[in-house]
Every structure is written in C-alpha cells, then in structure tokens.
Amino acid sequence: MKIRTLLAAAALVAATTHFATAQERVSWWYEQATPDQQKLIQGNIVDPFDKSQSKYHLTVDYRGTELDKQLRVAMLSGSGPDVVYTAGPSYVAPMAQSGQLLPLDDFAAKYGWNDRVLPVLLDMGRYNNKLYALPKTYETLGLFYNKSLFDKHGWKVPTSLGELDTVADAMLKEGIVPFAAGNGDWRGANEWFVTLALNAVAGPENINKALRGEMPWTAEPFVKAINTLDQWWQKGYFGKNYFSLTSSEQTADMLAAGRAGMMPSGTWQFQNVSTYFGKSGAAPGFVGFPSASGDPIFPLGVGSTFSIAAKSKYPDGAAAVIDFVFSPAVYGSMNSAWQGEWNIPLKDLSKVKMADNVMPLFTQTMTTLAKAVNDGNYGYTTWTFLPPATDGYLINGIEEVWLKRTTTEDYLAKLDATFQKEKQAGKIPAVPAR
C-alpha cells in the first residue's frame, strides 16, 4: 500500500513538474525598479498575465542602470530576452537595422494594435515602413512648482522666459534654489534640461527641421538655446548640489519642502510629487514649460519601448505579453499605483478605472498632453528623436559647457557631426509629420 502511495505521489510530482516546464517561459529584462515597484509589476502584470492563460509563464529580470549595455551585448550574441525593453525609439532603429528585432506588423494586425494605439506614437516605432516597437508610455517635460510657496511670496507662475528669470532671481534672493534638479543617480537627467532649452528657445519647428536634416544643429536658434541654458546654470538656478542630488526622490523632496521653488522635470515625477507633497502638506502645481513665444511647451517623449527579439524562442508569447500590457486593466492599475510611468498610449480610455486616490493634477496633465499630441502641438524630447551616439554626446557634453571646458559653438559642432554621421548610417528614429 505504501509502495502504491509513493508511486502515485511520484507520478503526481512528475506530472506537476511536466506541466510547469511545459509552459513557455517568456523573458523580459526591465530597467531599475525599487522593491515596491517590482511588487507592482509582479502584482499588476506578471501574476494576472500568468493567470489569464496557461501556455506562457512570464519572468521579469531587473537589470538596473546597466540594462542598455547588457542588452546590446546579449542581442548581438542572440542570448537576449524575448521581450526587448529599450530606453526609447532612438535605440530601436539601430537594432532593427542590424536585424535584431522582429517586425511586429503581423502581431499588430492580429491584436488590433493599429486601432488601439495613438497613431503618432505608433509611428515612432517604425523603421523602413515596418513596425518594430510599441511605446510603453508617453510623457512630457514641464515645470512642477510649489504652489504654496508661490502663494506665500506672491510669485506669478511664469509663462515666458522673461518671467521665468524674474521669479528665479527672486527665489535666489530668498535663499531658495530655483530649480530642484540633480543627476547623482542618473546622468541622463542632463538631457531633460537640454530638451527644455531647445524647445523653449529654438522652438519645435526648428528642431523638426534639424531632425530631418534641413537645418544643422549649429544654427543660431540652437546656439541661443544652449547659451540660455548655460546662463541658468551660471546664475545658480540649478543649485550647488546638482551632481550629488538624485534626479527623482531628493529633488521632489526639495520642492515639496520649499527648499526649491520649481522643478523642471517629466511626468514620471508624479509618483514622487504625490508622496513628498503628501508628507509636507504643501500644494503642487504643474504647467507647460515657458517659451520664447509665450506658448507653453510640451516636448513629446516615449520613455521606453517594447519589441520582440528576432531570435526569440517564443515570439508569440512575447507578443501576448505586450498585448496584455496594452490593456485598460493594466493602464488603470499601474497608473493608479505608479503615476506617470505607465501612461500607455491607448486611444480609448473609456474602459479604464483609476483609483480614487490618484492626484487630480496628474489626470489633468495627462488630459492636456493627450490634447496637445492630437492637435500636433508638441515639441521633441532628445531621448525619443535623436539617434543613440548623438544623444549620448548631448548628455555628456553639456556638462563640459557648464563647467567651462568647452564652448557652446564647439559643443554643437560635435553634436551636429555625430548626428550627420548617424543620419548617413540610417540610424535616425522616425519623425512624425507635423
């Protein structure tokens, strides 16, 4: 009797093991995420996806700030993940060009992605008229500010560059840092401010011309833009601790506590703004960044993208994962818990359910951004529209300008030379028509 029981138990274990291993294990490498954020991905994406079907099992591997470097090496050797997660469209073109990514057009037809995703953002994932990537989130840069601090001092929220200088200078006199900013944890934060200066001073139309090769990056509008950014730096608008402060939590804490008056940053910061303003009791505000024209600027960005590796063992499983992410359920649950980081570009949000505790300011901002995109009234983020080498130099080289190790003219000359080389090599991301 005992022998039969043992045999039966062994058979059950074998069957269970066979069932578990029979599932296709779809891998997805993700960037840096805190333990709490990893729990959100597990609870709102991984577990629900696994429960929704029995053929695939999703595994997420957190690679931190080394994701891009590790992904490049793995993709070359064919040992990368099934779901390819990049930092933005600028990384997609070179991978597609080298045959590392699978065209998604058949999956788009199967799942109806062409009808479910905002067209402008879908077009950013195309290369040579084929779809290679879907944007995980669309975002914008703008100006967060401490509304309570502004009310206390009677300061006007700036709508022009002149007004921005006026209020920033007033803050300096009060011992308040005008811009809560830092790159201590993420050097890439540098390009947020380059992006804002290019859009606010040179303007989206000139950026569009440069991206299409119709104007060099050394043109006068761009010289003026970088000079303006450098003036902000030299005047002390970024404070004395830029290179040691983290770009996210510490800067949001500075703003909420009133040690800084404004924070030029992206909509991904809503998660930290909600936390730290909740602790301080102050009221936050957010507006489009002031510009030379007087119109608010909303640079359009795609923070990360989903693709499928050309050498994936389970391309159908990877497509199923991406399709699951692009659902009203995931949009609602992830945006409710992790505001600003999962603004999935769905056309129809009527079926999305958001938690009651979501900041009204976040919902208002996303509505404003969606209208700006639909109306074609948007600017360009450098990490979305520049090719990788150009973007890399833009990030590192601006520090040389700030620290007086190079001039604006030399910085832009090298930027333009790098861009022209990548343009000739066909590595420029798609630029939607205005």
Image (spheres, rainbow, N blue to C red):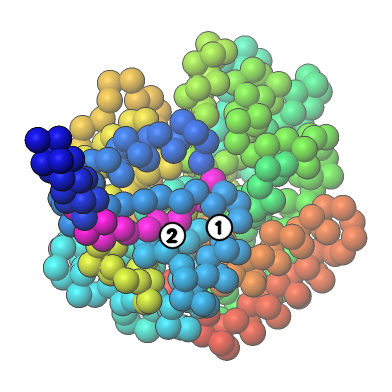
Specify the farthest residue to the right: 405
Q: Secondary structure at mark 2?
A: strand
With 395 as the anchor, is 41 left or right in this view? left
**Mark pair 1, 2: CA separation:** 9 Å
Instruction: Tell me residue 65's x, y (percent).
Output: 60, 51
Number of disc labels: 2
The region drawn magenta spans 19-32
Circles 1 and 2, Cβ within 8 Å, touching? The answer is: yes
Q: Residues within 10 Å of mark 2 (few under 14, many from 20)?
A: many
User: In this picture, is 33 found above or below 210?
Assistant: above
With 21 as the anchor, is 183 left or right in this view? right
Task: Please name whichever residue, 262 or 90, is drawn nearer the observer in this view of the structure.
Answer: 90
Q: Is residue 369 visible?
A: yes
Which residue corresponds to the image point at 44% horizontal and 38% vertical from the top-left? 38
Instruction: Tell me residue 202's x, y (percent).
Output: 61, 61
Query: Magenta includes 22?
Result: yes
Instruction: Tell me residue 422's x, y (percent).
Output: 60, 81
Which residue corresponds to the image point at 37% horizontal and 65% vertical from the top-left? 82
Question: For the N terminus, which image quadrant?
Answer: top left
Which residue corresponds to the image point at 30% horizontal and 43% vertical from the top-left? 45
Q: Secondary structure at mark 1?
A: helix
Question: For the C terminus, which image quadrant?
Answer: bottom left
Instruction: Tell me residue 335's x, y (percent).
Output: 34, 36
Query: Magenta includes 18?
Result: no
With 308 as the anchor, is 70 left or right in this view? right
Q: Residues within 10 Å of mark 1 (few under 14, many from 20)?
A: some
Task: Name the residue that disc number 1 marks.
Answer: 67
Type of amino acid at the residue the image marks with label 2: Tyr
Task: Name the residue that disc number 2 marks.
Answer: 85
Q: Earlier in the sequence, mark 1 or mark 2?
A: 1
